[in-house]
Image (spheres, rainbow, N blue to C red):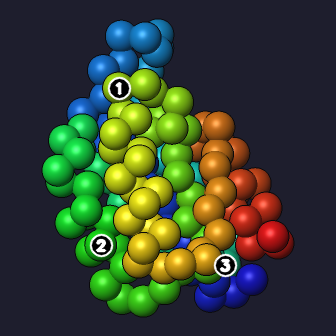
Amino acid sequence: MTGERVLQIGMDPEVIDFSGWPGQDAATLRRRVGEAEAALRRAGFEVTVCLLHDDPDTVDAAVAASFAHGAFDVVEIGAGLRMSPEYTVVLERVVNLVSRIQPGVHVCFNDSPETTLEAVLRGIRR
């Protein structure tokens, strides 16, 4: 697995409304996402993290910038982006842009930061 490239895409914790997530806040989520990134790196992956704002018009530039240094072996899209109805338009733009920039790249999904490594391993194994 050494050197395989992973792009993690998710919402920036600073823009999330945590009222529906008791016990969570931006600092806690940022720590959990950082731990997921560290686990990927320990497993030998090269990781790029792309945190998005809640304005759909900023998505294209943020995602495209992540691809500036080459292709990825797998793109992981975070649960917060996928499971929050208020981010549906953002999710659509992410999926469509990723498929345009790198057709055929495998996409995987976690259900929390703690399952990111598991999701990426599924994506790499295809």
Q: Position of residue 50 (x, y in %)?
A: 36, 60
**Spot occupied by residue 36 in the image (x, y as percentages of width and height):** 57, 53
Q: Mark 3, residues whose alpha carbon is within 10 Å: few (<14), some, or many (≥20)?
A: some
Residue assigned mark 2: 64
Label 1: which secondary element? helix
Q: Amino acid at mark 2?
A: Ala
Q: Quadrant of the C terminus?
A: bottom right
CA gap between label 1 and label 2 equals 22 Å
* Residue corresponding to mark 3: 44
Q: Cα distance, mark 3 to mark 1?
A: 34 Å
Q: Residues within 10 Å of mark 1 (few under 14, many from 20)?
A: few
Amino acid on which the number 3 mark rests in the picture = Gly
Residue at x 18%, y 54% (from the top left corner): 58
- Give above or below for 66 relative to 83: below
Q: Helix or strand or loop: what does disc 2 sit on?
A: helix
Checking the image for residue 86, the label placed there is 1
- Camera-near label (3 vs 1) is 1
Q: Nearer the viewer, residue 41 or 71?
A: 71
- The structure residue drawn at horizontal position 32% and vertical position 65%, both measured from the top left corner, is 63
User: In this image, 125 relative to 15: left or right?
Assistant: right
How many angstroms separate mark 3 from mark 2 (CA)? 24 Å
The quarter of the picture where residue 68 lies is bottom left
Most foreground residue, 84 or 41: 84
Residue 98 in the image, given as x and y percentages of width and height:
44, 67
**Mark 3 or mark 1, earlier in chain:** 3
- Tell me the residue at 25%/62% (across/down): 60
Closer to the eye: label 3 or 2: 2
The amino acid marked with disc number 1 is Glu
Whichever of labels 3 and 2 marks the residue nearer the N terminus, that label is 3
Closer to the chain start, of discs 1 and 2, is 2
